[in-house]
Amino acid sequence: MKFIHTADLHLDSPFRGLDEMPAQIWQRVHQSTFTAFERIVDAAINQQVDFILIVGDIYDRDHHSAEAEDFFVRQCQRLAKQQIPVYLSYGNHDYQPVTEQIDSLPNNVHVFGNQVETKTLTLADDQTVAITGFSYGKRWLVEDQVSKFPEKETADWQIGMLHGAISQNNPDQDHYAPFTLPKLLQKRYDYWALGHIHKHQVLNEEPLVVYPGNPQGRHKNEDGQHGYYLVQSNSDKLTAEFKPVAPIEWCEIDAHLTHDQTVDSLIEMLLHKGEAEDGFKMIAFNVHLTDQVNALTKKLLANGTILERLQENLSEKGDYQWWPYQLNLLKGTALPKMTDLDQEYWDQSAQDVFNQDAVIDLTDKLAKYGFIADQLADPSLVEQLRYEASQKLGEGDHDEN
């Protein structure tokens, strides 16, 4: 048996805040989620897999574009021509009521309904595979879904598909089919195909419990390699191998300024660092400043002039192998540190206050405006708010009264 496990395609992601890049770069970025999935389909055909699992969030939102749906259908049709079935579930981003087979999808695509159900198939070697899963019918699923999964019965292989997050034992956070690893293992399944978390990771080796991550990182917090897992049987066990497919990789690169660094030499240094990277990279430079750096350089860094000059340099060359989208200034002298107790309370409060659901709740009235709703839905916004709040806290008056 050989299959591909993927999830969180997020086709047609808007990539907010990047649309002012050169058209050639923007097109590459905007198409990246499509390109990543097309590469997965290519791999499925070349590897002659028995089936594909797509565990939620095929689309970036419940009201997706016609272009995204047409693209997905065409890729599934490619698989249909090779007799490769697709088993998919919808997640919290593309939730929808599923009452019967969706007409727009080819017959090789099997969609899980809103209640836990099991679908079976027989492989060419007559082995049987039972696949159990469900689709989201609403944005939040706070109820335990794993308890509704049957234990393994007579099938040669039993696979669970679960788009969800590990339970935090907190009703304010457990919104996405919360589960615990011990409860998954109690079902005696051969493989748990997870979705929802955008970082590929193996939660358990025997049996395998796997998050494939999303095939294409969508912002700076989804850095590093992204791809899918190729799963194969070896006697009575399964092995999973991560395969990168993302056409674009987000990364951060450190740059340390010397006291005699000129603006031109700084730009040259950043260009050299970017050109040394393999593959297409979206780069955020972390520029480390010291008190000895001259005032003009500091000013040009702070007001964005150096980033603009760096981007102009690449645009003039027209050879886009990487793109600097951000330049962060890091002071060589540390901000005043919190006491251990302050830090403990800050960490606890930050988790409660700076999460996506809390931000959406606090801005409920503003969310009726589409452009604001799009910003609020971006996970990087929460990280930015948390970071800026911590910086402001560090800059505050630390005199004890």
Image (cartoon, rainbow, N blue to C red):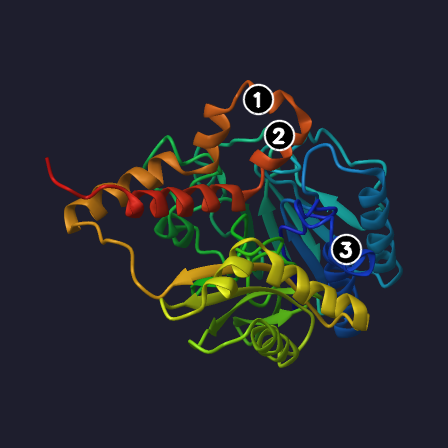
User: Which residue is found at the position 29% from the left and 55% from the top?
Assistant: 335
Residue 121 badge: none
User: Splitting the image into 4 quarters, where does residue 376 fall?
Assistant: top right
Left or right relative to 26: residue 239: left
Considering depth in this image, is 303 or 197 the residue closer to the camera? 303
Is any atom of residue 397 visible in this view?
A: yes
**Position of 144 relative to 256 (above/below):** above
Residue 366 badge: 1
Answer whether labels 3 and 2 touch (C-beta < 8 Å). Answer: no
Left or right relative to 87: residue 154: left
Q: Dot 1: within a 10 Å radius of its alpha carbon, few (fewer than 14), some, or many (20 or more) residues? A: some
What amino acid type is highlighted by mark number 2? Ile
User: Which residue is found at the position 48% from the left and 56% from the top?
Assistant: 189
Residue 372 badge: 2
- How far from the left and from the top, in percent, is residue 201? 48, 63
What amino acid type is highlighted by mark number 1? Leu
How much space separates mark 3 and mark 2, taking CA atoms? Answer: 21 Å
- How far from the left and from the top, in percent, is residue 331? 38, 62
Answer whether labels 1 and 2 touch (C-beta < 8 Å). Answer: yes
Q: Dot 3: within a 10 Å radius of its alpha carbon, few (fewer than 14), some, or many (20 or more) residues? A: some
Does dot 3 land on a helix, a strand or a loop? helix
Considering depth in this image, is 122 or 298 the residue closer to the camera? 298
Work out whether mark 3 precedes mark 2 in sequence or the reverse, and give the earlier one.
3
Work out whether mark 1 precedes mark 3 in sequence or the reverse, and give the earlier one.
3
Q: Dot 2: within a 10 Å radius of its alpha carbon, few (fewer than 14), some, or many (20 or more) residues? A: few
Is any atom of residue 210 visible in this view?
A: no
- How far from the left and from the top, in percent, is residue 291? 36, 66
Work out whether mark 1 precedes mark 2 in sequence or the reverse, and give the earlier one.
1
Residue holding disc 3: 26
- How far from the left and from the top, in percent, is residue 297? 51, 65
| The N terminus - image quarter | bottom right
What amino acid type is highlighted by mark number 3? Trp
